[in-house]
Amino acid sequence: QKEVEQNSGPLSVPEGAIASLNCTYSDRGSQSFFWYRQYSGKSPELIMFIYSNGDKEDGRFTAQLNKASQYVSLLIRDSQPSDSATYLCAVKGWNTGNQFYFGTGTSLTVIP
Amino acid sequence: ETGVTQTPRHLVMGMTNKKSLKCEQHLGHNAMYWYKQSAKKPLELMFVYNFKEQTENNSVPSRFSPECPNSSHLFLHLHTLQPEDSALYLCASSPITDRGSGELFFGEGSRLTVL
């Protein structure tokens, strides 16, 4: 069973703070890691993907990957109320065909 | 046109009805997916098509029947559903890269309620 674990939250941060979202995965063969944002009543939209150990930055978002610890995180700097959503972590391996494994998501609320 | 379009957005059906969900992607991708999203549960992969060929069927009950006539269109035919099948059904597409499937692009979803 390939599992992806996320703290369901809710996570609350004040506007302007850094929000830190964490995800762990069980399959050491995992190679590709994705963060999706899902607003209530909407479909998931891709924020970032990361393949290599280390940090990857895109605007206010930074994805961090540590394959040895089987851990991937998403940092949101200068959090805005519009960042309030559920964040889904997804993991994919080389030998899993088209199978993406999703966590249950972390609910984030940014308080004005 | 948006990347991945799903119709209908909302569907209410009785347990004896037959209905279909439709998905169309305008991104030139070669892989298309059906996912089920229920409250408090991870996204569940139902079916995958690569270049119109079904490659994944994750033990989905036969009351769900997929159809992929070409790389841009995907259908999910529904018949004799159960109330527990009520959920958000998401269609997605992805490119095929040298790493296998690339990132998923989702449609807006079809909210299904089975009475």
Image: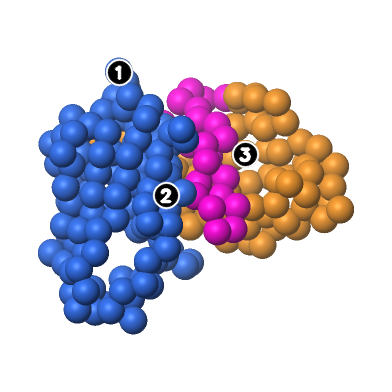
Chain colours: A orange, B blue
Tell me the chain of label 3. Answer: A
- Magenta part of the protein: which range? A26-54
**Residue lying at 65% horizontally and 24% vertically, measured from the top left:** A57
Instruction: Specify whether A63 is left or right of B109.
Output: right
The span from disc 2 to disc 3 (Cα, nearest Å) is: 15 Å
Instruction: Specify whether A79 is left or right of B70.
Output: right
Instruction: Write down the residue under mark 3.
Output: A74
Image quadrant where residue B27 sits: top left
Tell me the chain of label 1. Answer: B
Q: Is residue B104 above or below residue B20?
A: above
At numbered mark 3, what does the secondary structure look like: helix, strand or loop?
Answer: strand
Q: Is residue B20 above or below residue A66?
A: below
The span from disc 3 to disc 1 (Cα, nearest Å) is: 25 Å
At numbered mark 2, what does the secondary structure look like: helix, strand or loop?
Answer: strand
Image quadrant where residue A64 sits: top right
Residue B75 visible to the viewer: yes
Instruction: Specify whether A99 is left or right of B58.
Output: right
Instruction: Write down the residue under mark 2.
Output: A102
Instruction: Write down the residue under mark 1.
Output: B98
**Labels 2 & 3 near each other (Cβ < 8 A):** no
| Labels 3 and 1 in the same subunit | no
**Neighbour class for label 2 at 10 Å: few (<14), some, many (≥20)?**
many
Tell me the chain of label 2. Answer: A
